[in-house]
Image (tube, grey):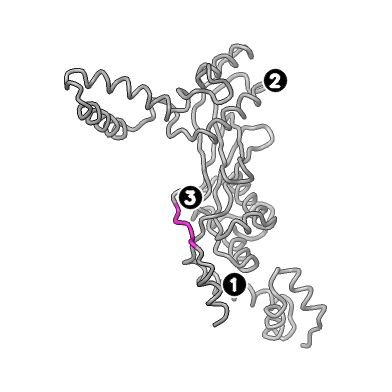
Amino acid sequence: MAFTAKDVKALREKTGCGMMDCKKALTEADGDMDKAVDYLREQGLAKQAKKSGRIAAEGIAFAKTNADNTLGVVIEVNAETDFVAKNADFQAFVETCADTVMVHNPADVDALLACSAVGSTETIDALLKEKVLTIGENIKIRRFARFEGTVTSYIHAGGRIGVIVKFDTDVADKDGFQTYAKDIAMQIAAINPGYLNEQSVPAEVLEHEKSIMKAEVVNSGKPEAIAEKIVMGKIGKFYKENCLVDQVFVKDSSLSVTQYTNNVAKELGGSIKITDFVRYEKGEGLEKREDNFADEVASMVK
């Protein structure tokens, strides 16, 4: 079955693939549009296998809540370049992933990939493979977290950092609470606390810090007898730097986060407790790709 330039254009619009790829697909499919789409998808699977080893350390950390702030999701989806992170199709895919986590509550990334995507008849895995095909980069869903209850979300710097925070409160419906909640999410984005409170610091972490502090005190010439007292003071500083509720509030250095929380709760006539949070920064802990421009140019002219 013959095909025309109009058919090639239609296939390009439908798949986002290049003109020559579409022309080849229609040739292989004898002009059948559906078979040509299948052919491109099959080629995409082959291309994805080649791309799967390439470093994906850019992308987006995205967070959102539902309309009444009773369900929240934060997710990180990685790509190879920052340019792709600004692509509208990539951003829409990331939000679809977040919406799917909200609706289906998958246990992990593998379970999410098997879920039917919200607003689509396909799975998240199928949509992911389509994006690899059309965008041309390795794309990976790295991690996500989902909270139910009173929640808020915050995205910093267009997706460099995503945060969700959970609260136990009886004033979530009061004017002023969402402003407070956003302040806490912004605090987490800016200061990056390692823990919620003192109780959430693992015992092994605390003991490790104490051993380092004690060695530092003893090595400075202080007697062993008073080293423990000095270490306890240093541990207090560790809590203030690393535990959210003990940190200095970034918008008012005269207050701690706990003091700010208590002040708002009193103003609104109820109680507020921060119970959990998740902060994702895109690419944290991942190996970054190091481009060598000279090598890239040399490879192009071979």
Picture layout, residue 142 above or below residue 192: below
Task: Characterize the local packing of mark 1: few (<14), some (14-19) or many (20 or more) Cα atoms within 10 angstroms.
Answer: many
Q: Looking at the rendering, which quadrant does residue 10 occupy?
A: bottom right
Question: Residue under circle 1?
Answer: 44
Along the line of sight, the residue nearer the viewer: 50 or 255: 255
Which circle's residue, 1 or 2, is located before the other in the chain? 1
Along the line of sight, the residue nearer the viewer: 268 or 61: 61
**Can residue 135 be found in the magenta stretch?**
no
Which circle's residue, 1 or 3, is located before the other in the chain? 1
Q: Main secondary structure of the magenta part?
A: loop
Question: Residue under circle 2?
Answer: 175
**Element under label 3?**
loop
Along the line of sight, the residue nearer the viewer: 302 or 272: 302
Q: Quadrant of the C terminus?
A: bottom right
How far apart are the two marked residues, 2 and 3, measured between alpha carbons? 36 Å
Q: Looking at the rendering, which quadrant does residue 174 occupy?
A: top right
Magenta residues?
A: 286-290
Kind of residue indicated by mark 3:
Asp
Picture layout, residue 81 above or below residue 167: below
Q: Residue 75: x and y, percent?
A: 55, 46
Picture layout, residue 101 above or below residue 208: below
**Can residue 289 be found in the magenta stretch?**
yes
Task: Characterize the local packing of mark 2: few (<14), some (14-19) or many (20 or more) Cα atoms within 10 angstroms.
Answer: few
Question: Residue under circle 3?
Answer: 108
Kind of residue indicated by mark 2:
Asp
Q: What residue is rendered at 50% in x and 37% in y?
A: 278
Disc sitting over residue 9 in the figure: none
Q: Looking at the rendering, which quadrant does residue 177 occupy?
A: top right
Q: What residue is rendered at 69% in x and 35% in y?
A: 67
How far apart are the two marked residues, 1 and 2, measured between alpha carbons? 50 Å
